[in-house]
Image: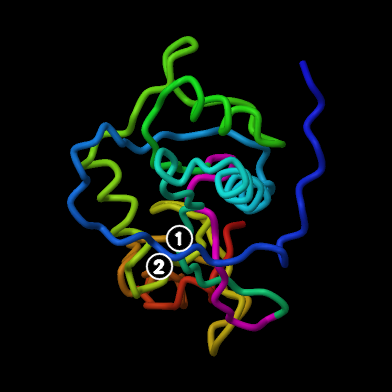
Amino acid sequence: MEAQQEPEQEHDEVQDEAPESEETPDDGRAWYVIHTYSGYENKVKKNLEQRIKAMGMQDRIFQVIVPTEEQVELKGGQRRTVQRRIFPGYVLVQMILDDESWSVVRNTPDVSGFVGMGNRPTPLAEEEVQRILERMETKSPTFKINFREGDPVQIVDGPFKDFHGTVDYIDRERGKVRVLVNFFGRETPIELDFLQVERT
């Protein structure tokens, strides 16, 4: 088994614009998924786009995207929004698949292969592609959480800092969590921001 290469630093990551979700021309083009090392997605995108241009493949390989979304996280006590890869280790390519286009993509540095059955790349269903593009285009950031309902947590910020409780309800759309905290022998529900609690 090959040893995995060290991933590039996160600050090299750039946001990939979602392509226009227009009607797909009836020329045989489809979206395929290629696999790479996690952390090398943007490097693969750049290398592949350079190869497409240099080898004159613009009429068969149309778009290369690294699906990303905005995510809110807490770092150093500060809330910040970062770009996170939706599918680490994977890159999407819209192309007309033939022997030549396959070779251009497959032989791009750091591409380990196409996703598919056996040696045959499997195209994504149009519905799957639309869901990915819509997720990229959403204006509401997701929240990084590492807990579930029923998990014990500690409050790390706000007036109830250092109190312990149990997750009662998670509202992902609003980025809020309801925690049951024991006050004087009685459980009291408190609504908090995702970033105000940590799993214990």
Residue 123, position in %: x, y?
34, 29
Question: Disc 2 on helix, strand or loop?
Answer: strand
Residue 41, position in %: x, y?
62, 48
Q: Is residue 152 above or below residue 125?
A: below
> Residue shown at 50%/60% (left/top)?
145
The disc placed on residue 166 is 1
Asked if the residue under mark 2 is in contact with the one under mark 1, i.e. CB atoms within 8 Å, the reply is yes
Q: Camera-side residue: 69 or 16? A: 16
What is the magenta range?
77-90
Q: Amino acid at mark 1?
A: Thr
Residue at the limit of the structure toward the front, as seen here: 56
| Residue 87 part of the magenta-drawn span | yes
Q: Residue tagged by mark 2?
A: 180
> Residue shown at 61%/76% (left/top)?
156
Mark 1 vs mark 2, CA separation in Å: 5 Å
Question: Disc 1 on helix, strand or loop?
Answer: strand
Q: Is residue 44 left or right of residue 143?
A: right
Q: Residues within 10 Å of mark 1 (few under 14, many from 20)?
A: many
> Residue shown at 65%/35% (left/top)?
108
> Residue shown at 32%/74% (left/top)?
174
Q: Is residue 131 left or right of residue 188?
A: left
Q: How is the image coloured?
A: rainbow
Image quarter of residue 25: top left
Q: Camera-side residue: 162 or 11? A: 11
Screen quadrant of the N terminus: top right
Q: Main secondary structure of the magenta part?
A: strand
Q: Camera-side residue: 28 or 93? A: 28
Residue 9, position in %: x, y?
77, 58
Counting residues from the N terminus, which is met first, the one under dot 1 or under dot 2? 1
Q: Amino acid at mark 2?
A: Leu
Image quarter of residue 60: top left
Residue 144, position in %: x, y?
51, 63
